[in-house]
Amino acid sequence: MSTDARRHPRSRELHRRASRHTPGGVHSNVRLAGPRIFFESGNGPWLRSVDGDDYVDYLLGQGPNFLGHAPQAVVQAVHEASRTGVIFGGQHELEIEAAELVCSTLRWPDMVRFCVSGTEAVQAAFRLARAVTGRTRIVRFEGHYHGWLDNVLMALGDDGWGVASAGQLAGHLDDFVVLPWNDADRLATVLAEEGERIAAVVMEPVMINAGVIEPLPGYLQRVRELCTSHGVVLIFDEVLSGFRLGLDGAAGRYGVTPDLATYAKALAAGWPVAALAGRAELMERFGTGEVNHSGTFNGSVVATAAVKASLELLRDNPPYAGIEEHGTALMAGIRELGQSYGVPLRAAGLPAAFHVSFGDAEVVDYRSLQQLDLARYEDLAEALVDHGVWVASRGVWYVSATHGPGELDAALTRFAKTLTEWL
Ligand code: PMP
């Protein structure tokens, strides 16, 4: 019998019902991988399931609940703003305030366009980069995730990087050059050979999606210089890192300014909003109508109220020191558990987002990440969920502004109990 059936009878019943009208019983294929638990509510860093179990949450909805679940200031701002309508097919003042806050908080961009998902923001960046350069090809990196559309979804197969889904048009990947990350020489070679055809270089400036790997010292600076000298647009996909690694994201943390950047997950406390930010010289092309970027739901009252309230909270009460403290202590606690249980538990990355796995290797890119025993962690993740720690099998743990000493204690106690029973 599966753990779902034993441990989560009500969730199991609901999943059966959901599956009648929803493929797989879930609305995102990412959720096919996890135990199909139904939740009743979230509060700060805690979740409660329909079976009455509580979970200390280190998944944060795959990242967005950076301010914890249901942060009251944002909930109230959204409720208040939406009482008098949410979409007008025209403009409203919250759009201005939210855009001003994004630009002033990040400090480097001049302009911003809101949309609904990270996937869309990335697509807008590609189109703009191609329009301004008049070139078509884009350099991307192994293991970096940029959404689920035909031109970006990729998996490593026997023949190298290719389509990851049935029905995906392989031809849409033709305009991409896929390189190992953290290797500036490889990028330099490609740009020397075919720089005149390359419109953009896109990357997660910290490879959070695969292993939470930091850029090597000087790497981002070198990429910046290479892009500038070849007239290539540098796009940072900060959908995960933005507002999470500090108020000014990865660009601020590593002191490297892109030409365009995408933001989403920590931007609006869980409300569905993404943003493309950039220099005026580029972004103005949308404003002239020369480059199309559209969307019925873009910049809605709900979205911009959530952005405004979230960024005001982050600006006025920056949670970053507390998150650093919590994440550092949690990573250390996990490593200590590994030692005391005699297993090579590895916790590495950054305090706000780190990666847990088994093994010991120098990890600098997607291929070196594969030296770790990722499958063993997948199994452990399932056991952790059974013991009330909400994490995903991919091994990325996120810390929110609301995690404190109580959650640290709960997480490590539950982790220890899991190991006792699982090993
Ligand atoms: N870029 C990155 C770096 C992401 O992590 C994600 C989502 N995990 C996306 C783009 C796509 O965002 P969305 O799921 O909102 O479409």
Image: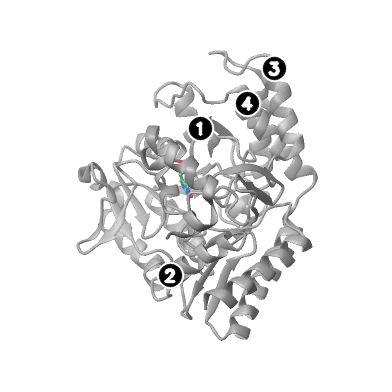
Asked whether the residues under the numbered discs 4 and 1 touch, taking CB atoms below 8 Å apart as contact, a structural biologist would say no
Q: Residue at x 44, y 72 (%)?
A: 376
Left or right: 224 as drawn, with respect to 66: left
From the image, tell me which residue sits under label 3.
Answer: 83
- Calculate the distance from the C-alpha at mark 4 to the C-alpha at mark 2: 39 Å
Of the numbered discs in the image, which one, if any, rests on residue 116? 1
Q: Is residue 215 visible?
A: no
Front residue of 1 and 381: 1
Vertical order, 194 against 217 (above or below): above
* Residue kind at label 4, given as amino acid type: Val
Precedes in sequence: disc 4 or disc 1: 1
- Calculate the distance from the C-alpha at mark 3 to the C-alpha at mark 2: 47 Å
Given this view, does label 1 or label 2 mark the residue nearer the observer? 2
Element under label 1? loop
Precedes in sequence: disc 1 or disc 3: 3
- Calculate the distance from the C-alpha at mark 1 to the C-alpha at mark 2: 32 Å
Q: Quadrant of residue 40?
A: top right
- Calculate the distance from the C-alpha at mark 3 to the C-alpha at mark 4: 10 Å
* Mark 3 crowdedness (10 Å alpha carbons): few <14, some 14-19, many ≥20: few
Precedes in sequence: disc 3 or disc 2: 3
From the image, tell me which residue sits under label 4.
Answer: 302
Q: Position of residue 234 (x, y in %)?
A: 45, 49
